């Protein structure tokens, strides 16, 4: 019987192979979740500022695009390439005219239609394609449009930009 006892003893020792622990303890899991929560809460304000900056860049682009279209219309009118209404001073009567286009006058251009804008852009700050308009006859800081021609466009948003200026002053 002594041989069987020694065999059992050897068998037990061979089964005690140390295996590395797998997985995480509860404390490690809590610490990892806390670190992830802290990083996520730090990234949220950065994401908000990024969205606001994108909207501001889009607003600047849209205003520049519409003002360039108004300037091109005025240039065509001053050179006599398009017909203008008397008293409009060569500025477009409304934004739709820039989109629809006007017939070119002059030699060799009969029947041609020139467009200055593809479409009226949506104001990224208000979410509407409704822009504030100024005529040459209006006061420079006026918020009401005289209705005769368009000299300038601005956003109707009452918000303030990241740099502290008002969107309506851009």
Image (tube, helix red, strand yellow):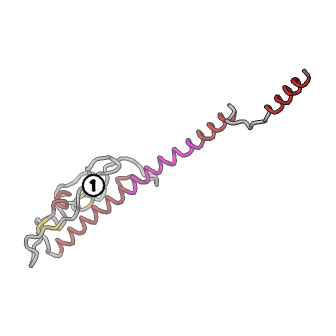
Judging from the image, what secondary structure is the residue with disc 1 in? loop
Q: Residue at position x 36%, y 59% from top?
A: 60
In the figure, residue 111 lies in which quadrant? bottom left
- Left or right: 48 in relation to 37: left
- Is residue 46 rendered magenta in the image? yes
Residue 73: x percent and y percent?
A: 20, 67
Count residues near mark 1 (Cα–Cα under 10 Å), then give few for <14, some for 14-19, many for 20+: some
Residue 145: x percent and y percent?
A: 22, 54
Is 127 located above or below residue 109 in the figure?
above
Residue 32: x percent and y percent?
A: 64, 38
Is 95 located above or below residue 13 in the figure?
below
- Is residue 167 rendered magenta in the image? no
Q: Nearer the viewer, residue 44 or 13?
A: 13
Q: Nearer the viewer, residue 159 or 99?
A: 99
Q: Residue furthest bottom?
A: 107
Residue 5: x percent and y percent?
A: 88, 23
Q: Residue at position x 72%, y 36% from top?
A: 21
**In what quadrant of the picture does the N terminus appear?**
top right
- Left or right: 20 in relation to 127: right
Q: Which residue is the site of mark 1?
A: 121
Specify the segment rendered in magenta: 39-57
Q: Residue at position x 65%, y 35% from top?
A: 29
**In what quadrant of the picture does the C terminus appear?**
bottom left
Is 103 located above or below residue 154 in the figure?
below
- Left or right: 79 in relation to 121: left
User: What number of labels is visible?
Assistant: 1
In the figure, residue 42 lies in which quadrant? top right
Magenta span main SS: helix
């Amino acid at each position: 019987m002594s041989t069987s006892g020694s065999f059992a003893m050897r068998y037990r020792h061979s089964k005690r192979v140390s295996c590395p622990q797998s997985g995480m303890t509860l404390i490690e899991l809590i610490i990892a979740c806390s670190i992830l929560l802290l990083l996520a809460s730090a990234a949220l304000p950065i994401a908000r500022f990024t969205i606001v900056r994108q909207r501001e860049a889009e607003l600047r682009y849209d205003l520049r695009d519409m003002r360039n279209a108004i300037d091109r219309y005025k240039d065509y009118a001053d050179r006599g390439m398009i017909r203008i209404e008397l008293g409009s001073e060569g500025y477009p009567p409304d934004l739709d005219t820039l989109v629809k286009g006007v017939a070119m006058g002059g030699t060799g251009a009969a029947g041609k239609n020139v467009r200055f804008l593809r479409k009226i852009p949506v104001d990224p700050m208000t979410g509407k394609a409704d822009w504030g308009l100024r005529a040459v006859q209006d006061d420079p800081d006026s918020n009401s449009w005289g209705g005769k021609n368009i000299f300038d466009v601005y956003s109707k948003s009452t918000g303030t930009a990241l740099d502290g200026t008002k969107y309506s002053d851009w």
